[in-house]
Image (cartoon, rainbow, N blue to C red):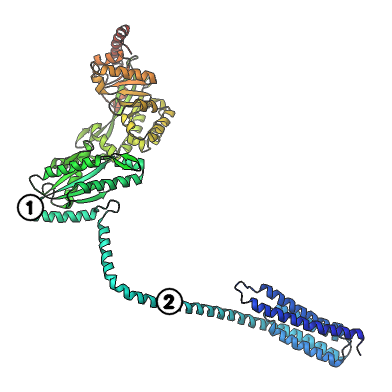
């Protein structure tokens, strides 16, 4: 018979276990509701399920421990049967978590098996063995059940994903079918106007393909087609055609200084002015960049040149009028070349090329001009082109050579410096002077390698010159070299190759530096002076002379141009005196170049100009004869004699107050 306390405990156990089952059932129902939510991940529900399983396992584990001695043999056998059945069921129910299965099996089977094991009696030993064997078998079986269950779960999830995809595809297909039906419905209406739209679009594309996007004028391809058609018509009707090649002057400056929006506005405005002035049947095209080409058709052959020149002059005058944009104004001009059919060409390419040649020749003689093509012009342009091609190979073929012209200090009879001058010994044309090929080199860009060669060769030659002190070497520098940014590196390379000290290098720049951007010029000249190199301003007074520019540029010396020296006895005398006074005020040396007579030299000395250069002292000396000239006593004696004569004249003039 059970004791009173055992009965109470058993009743309590019987109440608690159903309560656990009820709580788990409620939790399972709640989990199923939450599972429908979009953000449900199941982890919290899984933890609650495990706690419920463990609570049930703990309850069944406590039953044999608490009531083993109170149960009869029948009750114990029933207990074994129940827990074994539950254990077998847990292998399947809890198969998804094998560790949970093992814990549950241990809670169900091991406590009662241990109690049977420690209780004497063969029936108890049998029941203990039965429980332990069941635990081992079910634990092993749980692995197979777990694998099968997980495989089934994965397959189920894949099937669910497939179902979702199939449902999505179904909805997508239904939507696509609906759209297709709508498209078919609208297509029926669209077909009625589709041909009209295609025709309009084709016309628009044809127009865009033949027009310049910025100006609306014909483009290059369309111009060629129109010109070919005009030539065919002119041949049939025996009339003339004029091709005008228009190039804008100063457009690059506007585009660089004001920006591309300004540049686009200028091009559009010029195009508008061209269309406003030419006849209605004139073809206007933008050739490219700031170039335009116009075709005047149906001209009378005898007066075609005059008619074309009249139209071109009116066009140039219209382009030259000020252009306003964003409350600012700019001015550009136009240079125009004219070619006539059939006089200057019978094909589109020939006419455009001849008009381009005429424009280029007009630009060479000064901007803002109109010029018609002539055969002599073509020959001159071809000659210049051949000369440019030959110049590019002059250095490699060792055709350039240096000569040096002394600059004499009249107060000491000493050679102050020698200016390096380059000559071109062409194999068939003979000696070509710098005035003929240096402008070509500056336009083509070949001045940069030529200047680099002159720097190196002149510095190497100067390094061997005798004298105490040895004379400096004066090198001419093109503005293109400064703007191109190569001067500093070229000078450093020449110094490294020759070992010449920087104090013996003078660089001469022309007044064209005033026409360039000082933001590029001044820093380069300052850097050269900081290296110890003296800077001379050549041809002073003939070009862009400006007192404000002269004050801002780092200049050590100014060279009075030969045109002033030649007229020093007349009108140029006061100018040279003013230059001398200006130089004194700015602490700048003065050199007079082109001195050819003793009278001119004496006059210059009387004005305080003591550094002289010219044929009076020496013509340009070949490089291999410079050392001999320097050590030749005759050269120094001639300079000294001239200097003595000049000094005596200077003294007499100084007494009368004319010096300086």
Question: From the viewer's perspective, is residue 295 above or below residue 577?
Answer: below
Q: Does residue 213 show up?
A: yes
| Picture quarter with the N terminus | bottom right
Q: Residue at x 64, y 76 (%)?
A: 34
Neighbours of disc 1 within 10 Å: few (<14), some (14-19), many (20+):
some
Neighbours of disc 2 within 10 Å: few (<14), some (14-19), many (20+):
few
| Disc on res. 292 | none
Residue behind mark 2 = 176
Quarter holding residue 470: top left
Whole-percent x, y for residue 360 in the image: 21, 41
Q: Is residue 488 left or right of residue 109?
A: left
- What residue occupies the far bottom of the structure in this picture? 74
Q: Does residue 141 show up?
A: no
Q: Nearer the viewer, residue 444 or 341?
A: 341
Whole-percent x, y for residue 605 in the image: 30, 14
| Picture quarter with the C terminus | top left
Dot 2 falls on a residue whose secondary structure is helix
Dot 1 falls on a residue whose secondary structure is loop
Of callouts 2 and 1, the N-terminal one: 2
Nearest to viewer (mark 2 / mark 1): 2
Whole-percent x, y for residue 177 in the image: 42, 78
Question: From the viewer's perspective, is residue 431 above or below residue 465?
Answer: below
Whole-percent x, y for residue 523 in the image: 41, 33
Residue behind mark 1 = 238
Q: Nearer the viewer, residue 221 or 330?
A: 330
Q: Nearer the viewer, residue 529 or 68?
A: 68
CA–CA distance in space, label 2 to label 1: 67 Å
Q: Nearer the viewer, residue 428 or 64?
A: 64
């Amino acid at each position: 018979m059970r004791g009173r306390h055992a009965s109470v405990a058993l009743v309590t156990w019987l109440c608690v276990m159903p309560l656990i089952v009820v709580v788990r059932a409620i939790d399972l129902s709640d989990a199923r509701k939450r599972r429908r939510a979009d953000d449900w991940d199941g982890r919290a529900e899984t933890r609650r399920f495990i706690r419920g399983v463990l609570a049930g396992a703990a309850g069944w584990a406590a039953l044999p421990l608490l009531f083993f001695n109170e149960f009869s043999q029948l009750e114990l056998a029933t207990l074994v049967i129940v827990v074994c059945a539950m254990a077998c069921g847990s292998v399947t129910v809890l198969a998804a978590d094998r560790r949970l299965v093992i814990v549950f099996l241990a809670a169900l089977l091991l406590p009662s098996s241990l109690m049977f094991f420690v209780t004497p009696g063969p029936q108890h030993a049998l029941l203990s063995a039965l429980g332990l064997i069941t635990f081992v078998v079910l634990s092993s079986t749980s692995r197979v059940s777990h694998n099968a269950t997980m495989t089934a779960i994965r397959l189920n999830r894949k099937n669910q994903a497939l179902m979702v995809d199939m449902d999505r595809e179904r909805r997508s297909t239904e939507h696509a079918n609906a759209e297709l039906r709508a498209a078919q419905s609208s297509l029926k209406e669209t077909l009625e106007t589709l041909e009209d739209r295609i025709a309009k679009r084709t016309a628009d594309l044809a127009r865009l393909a033949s027009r310049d996007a910025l100006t609306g004028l014909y483009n290059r391809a369309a111009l060629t087609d129109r010109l070919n058609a005009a030539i065919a018509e002119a041949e049939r009707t025996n009339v003339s055609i004029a091709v005008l090649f228009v190039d804008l002057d100063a457009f690059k400056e506007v585009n660089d200084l004001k920006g591309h929006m300004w540049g686009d506005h200028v091009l559009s405005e010029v195009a508008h002015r061209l269309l406003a002035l030419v006849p209605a049947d004139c073809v206007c095209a933008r050739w490219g960049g700031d170039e335009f080409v116009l075709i005047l058709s149906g001209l009378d052959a005898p007066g075609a040149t005059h008619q074309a020149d009249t139209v071109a002059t009116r066009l140039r005058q219209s382009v030259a009028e000020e252009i306003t944009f964003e409350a600012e104004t700019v001015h550009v001009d136009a240079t125009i070349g004219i070619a006539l059919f059939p006089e200057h060409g019978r094909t589109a390419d020939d006419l455009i090329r001849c008009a381009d040649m005429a424009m280029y020749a007009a630009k060479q003689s000064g901007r803002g001009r109109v010029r018609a093509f002539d055969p002599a012009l073509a020959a001159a342009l071809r000659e210049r082109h051949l000369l440019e091609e030959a110049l590019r190979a002059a250095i490699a073929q060792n055709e350039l050579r240096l000569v040096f012209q002394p600059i004499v200090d009249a107060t000491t009879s000493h050679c102050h410096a020698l200016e390096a001058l380059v000559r071109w010994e062409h194999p068939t044309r003979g000696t070509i002077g710098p005035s003929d090929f240096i402008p070509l080199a500056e336009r083509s860009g070949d001045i940069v390698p030529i200047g680099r060669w002159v720097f190196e060769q002149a510095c190497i030659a100067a390094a061997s010159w005798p004298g105490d002190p040895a004379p400096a070497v004066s090198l001419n520098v093109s503005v293109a070299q400064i703007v191109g940014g190569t001067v500093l590196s070229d000078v450093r390379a020449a110094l490294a190759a020759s070992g010449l000290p920087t104090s013996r290098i003078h660089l001469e720049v022309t007044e064209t530096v005033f026409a360039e951007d000082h933001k590029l010029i001044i820093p380069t000249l300052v850097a050269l002076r900081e290296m110890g190199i003296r800077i001379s301003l050549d041809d002073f007074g003939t070009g862009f002379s400006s007192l404000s520019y002269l004050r801002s540029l780092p200049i050590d010396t100014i060279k009075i141009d030969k045109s002033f020296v030649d007229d020093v006895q007349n009108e140029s005398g006061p100018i040279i005196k003013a230059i001398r006074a200006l130089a004194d005020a700015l602490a700048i040396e003065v050199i007079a170049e082109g001195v050819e007579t003793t009278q001119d030299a004496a006059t210059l000395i009387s004005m305080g100009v003591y550094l002289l250069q010219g044929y009076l002292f020496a013509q340009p000396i070949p490089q291999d004869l410079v050392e001999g000239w320097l050590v030749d006593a005759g050269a120094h004696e001639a300079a000294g004699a001239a200097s003595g004569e000049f000094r005596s004249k200077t003294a007499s003039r100084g007494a009368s107050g004319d010096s300086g």
